[in-house]
Image (tube, grey):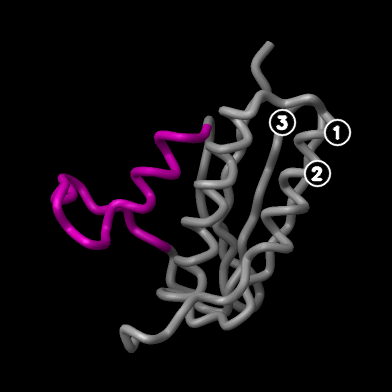
Amino acid sequence: MSPLELPPDWSAAREELRAATARAGWRPGLVADAETALLELFVNAWRHGGSSAPLVVIVLRDRVLRVSVGDGSPVLPVQRDGADPYAVCGRGLHLVRSLTDRSGADPRTSGKSCWFELDAAA
């Protein structure tokens, strides 16, 4: 990746996430956590999965938000243990796991889907 390369535009996915959570009355803090986790998975799909247009699916059902980001790489992500707190990269999955209630990755016919779930506060 060249320093001048920028990730693809994720604003449509972010706006869809904001619209879904606003309709459901979610607290701004939870929405911010979901946005941060979405951005991390989106950039990972571009940077590590080689996707110029990651596929984002946002589902809000029964007070559970599920966000999936797909790319064409079959390589499932591996969380690094003891990530260096000063490293430029390598802490993204730690961040997603700390902001969400559940997360993971599933193989697909072509590539994989990384996802997280966030429960609305009672």
**Residue carrying label 1:** 23
Of the residues shown, which amino acid type is indicated by label 3? Val
Of the residues shown, which amino acid type is indicated by label 2? Ala
**Residue carrying label 3:** 64
| Quadrant position of the N terminus in the picture | bottom left
The kind of secondary structure element at disc 3 is strand
The kind of secondary structure element at disc 1 is helix
The secondary structure that most of the magenta stretch takes on is loop
Q: Nearer the viewer, residue 22 or 104?
A: 22
Residue at 76 percent across and 36 percent down: it is 21
Residue at 80 percent across and 41 percent down: it is 20
Residue at 59 percent across and 62 percent down: it is 113
Residue at 42 percent across and 85 percent down: it is 5
Identify the residue at the far right of this view.
Answer: 23
- Which one is in front in this view, the residue at disc 2 or the one at disc 3? 2
Of the residues shown, which amino acid type is indicated by label 1? Arg
Residue 63: in magenta span: no
Task: Using the numbered discs, state the Cα–Cα distance from disc 2 to disc 3 in whole angstroms.
Answer: 15 Å
For the record, the magenta segment spans: 77-100
Label placed on residue 19: 2
Task: Using the numbered discs, state the Cα–Cα distance from disc 2 to disc 1 in whole angstroms.
Answer: 6 Å
